[in-house]
Amino acid sequence: AMKRSGGLESFDSPGKGRGLRVTRPFQVGELLFSSQAYSHVLSVKERGCYCESCFTRKEGLARCGKCKKAFYCNVKCQKGDWAMHKLECSAMTAFGENWCPSDMSRLVARILAKKKVQMERSASERILLIGEMQSHLEDMDNEKREMLEADVAGLHRFYSKHLEIPDHKDLLTLFSQVACNGFTVEDEELSHVGTAVYPDVALINHSCLPSVIVTYDGTSADVRAVQDMNPGDEVLISYIDLLYPTDDRNSRLRDNYYFTCQCQECTSKSMDETKLKVRKQSEPIEPEVINNMVRYARKTIGEFRAFKHIKNILRSPPSELLEMCEQSLEEMGAVFDDSNVYMLNIMYQAMGVCLYMQDPDGAIRYGEKIAKSYSKLYPPYSLNVSSLYLKLGKLYIGQERPSVAISALKKAAAIMEVTHGKNHFYLTELRKEMKRN
Ligand SMILES: [Zn+2]
Ligand SMILES: [Zn+2]
Ligand SMILES: [Zn+2]
């Protein structure tokens, strides 16, 4: 059934299935809607920095007296979260160091607990019900299914004492729905705060030229226009990192979301050549040499991703990682220009390692190189661009270079005023930071 709510309605989007469109005009920076989380969970590594209940970031949070692991703004937040936290509170103590469910299992446990008490449509389901989210269980390959099975096993192992667990088939469906429709809640520097489900936001289809961006305010998701929109226009977000050329974007989309994008950029591929820019040389480089280097770059980036995934990044000495980055930059740099997206990917990794090693000079060196190209290669109002300028601004402040710092922070603020809204907590903090310098 078609559902309408405040200037929005669901509709059948040609070639895409269900979608969301606007029924009135929206301007750049305007809020289309804000959605409470149906369910949310804070990452274990962020405990103590954010309130488990409302995701407020502040110092001096109060600890749960029982497990001593969850932190809250106050008694009100703690009480509000108890129905969810009780799924883990005593189990964490009982399992001790062996307590290690995935974020996915933790989130599904919360969804199951909420489903038991939530009988009516929740505030996050004004247009789409959680049960109506797409599952793609049939499309998953063995590797994906095995990952789901591991999450199911984790749910049984860590939550069966406090939760009525449905039968295997229903559980697999729910896990695959959450895998395809879950959102990663990120802070202003794009670091991972938690995971959440927003059924209404999950209705929005993908485009590589998105008309809206999702940002977070506590545990709520805000959907804001980054293009002017007219009545009848489809609401489109990007599901992926838009830095990469068309083939890479689409293999990402097929792998994780089981479709191929047909947006204007995917059809025209107008940015591909710029994104894959090769170094200027006296003799033109053979296409075969370029293709080989693209293959090498994809392999290297895949290896880095796997490496981080298994959390090795913290175990192996960072200097070794930095050396890996420098080596591949040298190898690729023989063929690729510094603005080539594969070069940028490795420079971004290298910047992260420098930040981790507390080497601000190194981080700034990489960051400045990246910033020049990022603004050209990403669509306007990109969080990847604003977060990079934030990081650079903070690094300059640390180096007591206030004028370059302010200029970087201003660039971030200009984007965030559109993506986050002028009154967002991140912007009030940012304005304070700029005043101090
Ligand atoms: Zn709170
Ligand atoms: Zn507790
Ligand atoms: Zn596309």
Image (cartoon, helix red, strand yellow):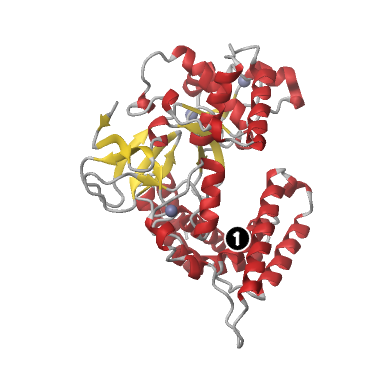
Is residue 299 visible in the rendered structure shown here? Answer: yes
Q: For the residue marked with disc 1, what is the amino acid? A: Asn
Query: Which residue occupies 25% across, 47% down?
Result: 26
- Up-down: is 287 above or below 353? below
Percent from the top left, x then y, of residue 257? 51, 41
Task: Find residue 369 and report its image quarter.
Answer: bottom right
> Residue placed at 29% from the left, 52% from the top?
28
Q: Name which residue lies at 57% across and 64% down.
A: 367
Answer with left or right where residue 79 lies relative to residue 152: left
Percent from the top left, x then y, of residue 174?
53, 24
Q: Element at badge 1? A: helix
Q: Residues within 10 Å of mark 1 (few under 14, many from 20)?
A: some
Q: Residue at x 66, y 18 (%)?
A: 156
Asked whether mark 1 and ligand 3 are closer than 8 Å, the reply comes as no
Residue 91 position within the rendered picture, expressed as x and y whole percent measured from the top left:
68, 18
Report whether 111 appears left or right of 125: right
Depth order, front residue of 391/112: 112
Whether 2 is drawn above or below 356: the answer is: above
Give how far across and how far down residue 225 sits, in percent.
Answer: 32, 48
**Disc 1 target residue:** 345
Q: Depth check: 107 or 421 in front?
A: 107
